[in-house]
Image: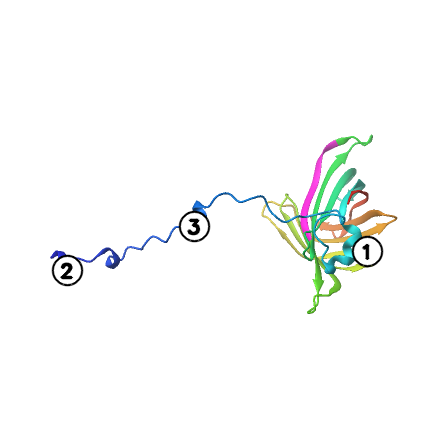
Amino acid sequence: MSASSAPDAGQSGAPESPPRPPWLDAPPVDPYPYEESHDLRVGPKLHPALNALLPYIGVWRGRGGGTYPTIENFDYAQEIRLSHDGRPFLRYESRAWLLDDESRPVRPAGREVGWWRAVTDAEGRATGELEATMMTPTGVMELYLGRITGVRVELATDAVVRTGTAKEVTAGHRLFGIVDGALLYAQEMAAVGQPLSPHLSARLIRVAG
């Protein structure tokens, strides 16, 4: 074969290397530039769709009790943080720890992260409905649907997804309310073959926000 008849690189069938993305050589970026706040006196303006949830925004800390047909009753302390960044949802974060009979910490307990999303109509007005996602480090992810009525929030699971190693949880129901300035809640759970049964209840005091 003569040199003139040999295929060039573009005709050899070998794929061409894609151009190098410019971000591979870009300098580091500054820290996240948008503020998230659990204090309505500072930070971004609260989205109008969240006005009904305004009393919940803050950091809450207090005590509760746990029970279930398959376990012994227990006491716990808990901190819940509800914050916003100006968009129509709240960030939810909870961490709890077990207490002994003298209210001393025993060990870390349940943790959750998630989002409370206000449902709006075509004009962007809040409907009073709420969508919430909750996820635990033990492999359980729950989708809740509910409603805001005054200072009361009621949520029930629409779906529960579990990893292959997670304990069986099939349904949940939660009630939240602001009573005399405190955050009270009660949680029911269906799990490990048991029907929906009382599981957790607590009274938390606002410590920030």
Bounds of the magenta span? 106-115
Residue 172, position as x, y percentages in the image: 73, 53
Instruction: Answer left or right for 178 relative to 120.
Output: right
Single out the residue that lies furthest toward the bottom: 122
Q: Residue at x 71, y 47 (%)?
A: 37
Residue 96, position as x, y percentages in the image: 73, 39
Single out the residue that lies furthest toward the right: 180
Q: Which residue is drawn at 83% across and 58% down?
A: 150
Judging by the rendered image, the residue that carries numbered circle 2 is: 5
Q: What element carries label 2?
A: helix
State the quadrant of the N terminus: bottom left
Scheme of image coloration: rainbow
In this view, the mark in front (1 or 3) = 3
Asked which quadrant contains residue 54, the reply is bottom right
Q: Residue 22 carries which label?
A: 3
Judging by the rendered image, the residue that carries numbered circle 1 is: 152
Mark 2–mark 1 CB contact (< 8 Å): no
Alpha carbons under labels 3 and 2: distance apart: 37 Å
Badge 1 or badge 3: first in the primary sequence: 3
Badge 3 or badge 2: first in the primary sequence: 2
* Dot 3 amino acid type: Pro
Q: Is mark 1 on a helix, strand or loop?
A: strand
Q: Is mark 3 on a helix, strand or loop?
A: helix
Is residue 55 on the magenta stretch?
no
Q: Is the magenta stretch mostly helix, strand or loop?
A: strand
Badge 2 or badge 1: first in the primary sequence: 2
Instruction: Answer left or right for 166 relative to 126.
Output: left
